Image: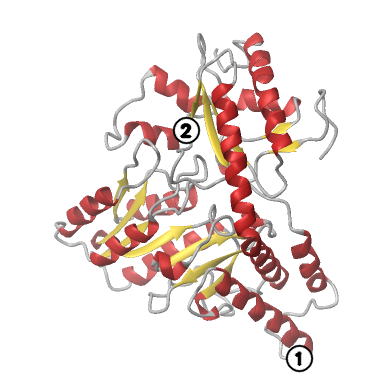
Amino acid sequence: MGALLDDVSPMIYLDYAATTPLSLAALAAMQPYFSNMFANPASLHSGGRAANAALEKARTTLACCVNAESPSTITITGGGTDGSNLVIAGLAQRWEADTDPSDCHILVSAIEHEAVLNPALALHKRGWQLTVLPVTPTGHVSVDALERALQQSLHQPNAQKTLVSIMHANNEVGSLQPIQALASLAHQYGAVFHTDAVQTVGKIPVDVQQLGVDYLTWSAHKHYGPKGVGALYTAGGALTPAPLLLGGGQENGLRSGTVNVAGAVGVATALEECVAAQPKSFARLEMLTQHLRDGLESLLCPCPLVINTPADDSIPGIVHVSVLGNSFPIQGESLLLQLDLLGIAASSGSACHAVALEPSRILHAMMVGENSDRALTSEELARATGTIRFSMGHHTTQQDVDALLAAFPKALNRLMKTAPTMSGVH
């Protein structure tokens, strides 16, 4: 992955939660659809029919991988953000056709990805009721918290349409939510349920029927598929969202535009490969995750470390840690640069806003809980500022983890020597 500026040999990639390398099998499967099988799947000639057959085969594979009722429940999208916006904004269009926006209610967790949080905020601006559900100190949404919020919604005089959107696993700290219980409860109160499963599909078993969700969205590039493609599952009997793109009516009218056949083939091939390897890869990632946690807890560092990823009910492969500065705040981004110089590629949180020098809003939510208006203490602010996320994948080895554990104190010592400039103090 390129030459280094220090004494560690090849670059060690520990940012799999941000994106993954394209599977060689997926690349090979996609290749014909860039060249001799390039036809538009909507065309009626033999080339178009061949492309359409490949598209439908990919749809069938995706349905099997998540145990959907039928291939018709799967819509090919442009990725996780595209899919989540299609569900939220598309349902809003359907409901607002015969319901005032003030009679509609959306509930999201405080740790949702911006692909869900920002559409929810946009609905709130145009009159929707919005509830942001608190999380526990381990980053979980409790069933009790959702029930209290739904009970309060029932007491609103005009609440008629309710959507709950809670992510399957958090992209920053890895907390795995009790989606089956949350979705079941939402249905008891007449709400519909969507989950952003970007961080779980391909990594852990995802069975849409067992989860009991109405809508589930994911992105190919998180499970060794191509970027710019993903999928939406819509349960049989669930209301189909209104299309956000108006055009030729592709994907059963839900997402107009010439379908990305190569991308569909790539996401299906990559996911099928991941699902087949899951028993072995899951156990290996669990072992590596525990090895990294144990190593961080025993490191001799000039600053205290706090592991934010819960030991239980989290997806394997993610370890999120805070570095607490002794006499000055540590900026996670500054520590990342030092690790990069030592050949370690990691992140400070979500790659979607990795350049923003701001405290982690995920940790903020975990620390304040239901008291969302409470300001963070100086110690909590330090914890939310000096954050690093290490995420592992198919190609991560124990030697990679050991190299990180050797480099981490070195990077921190280098950073402290450059204080206050690199620490973020002005």
Looking at the picture, does residue 167 appear above or below residue 88?
above
| Residue 63: percent from left, percent from top | 55, 74
Three-letter code for the amino acid on which mark 1 is drawn: His
Furthest-bottom residue in this view: 45
Disc 1 versus disc 2: nearer the observer:
2
**Where does the C terminus fall, quadrant-wise?**
top right
Q: Name the residue carrying label 1.
A: 45
Q: Nearer the viewer, residue 317 or 79?
A: 317
How many other residues sit within 10 Å of disc 2, few (<14), some (14-19) or many (≥20)? many
Q: Earlier in the sequence, mark 1 or mark 2?
A: 1
| Residue 138: percent from left, percent from top | 39, 38
For the residues labelled 1 and 2, say whether their Cβ atoms are less than 8 Å apart. Answer: no
Residue at x 73%, y 80% (from the top left corner): 40
Q: Nearer the viewer, residue 26 or 152?
A: 26
Figure quadrant of residue 412:
top right
| Residue 87: percent from left, percent from top | 44, 65
Residue at x 25%, y 59% (from the top left corner): 102
How many other residues sit within 10 Å of disc 1, few (<14), some (14-19) or many (≥20)? few
| Residue 60: percent from left, percent from top | 60, 78
Q: How is the image coloured?
A: secondary structure
Q: Is residue 379 left or right of residue 413?
A: left
Q: Nearer the viewer, residue 113 or 391?
A: 391
Figure quadrant of residue 88:
bottom left
Q: Which mark is residue 21?
A: none
Q: Name the residue carrying label 2.
A: 308
Q: Is residue 109 left or right of residue 21?
A: left
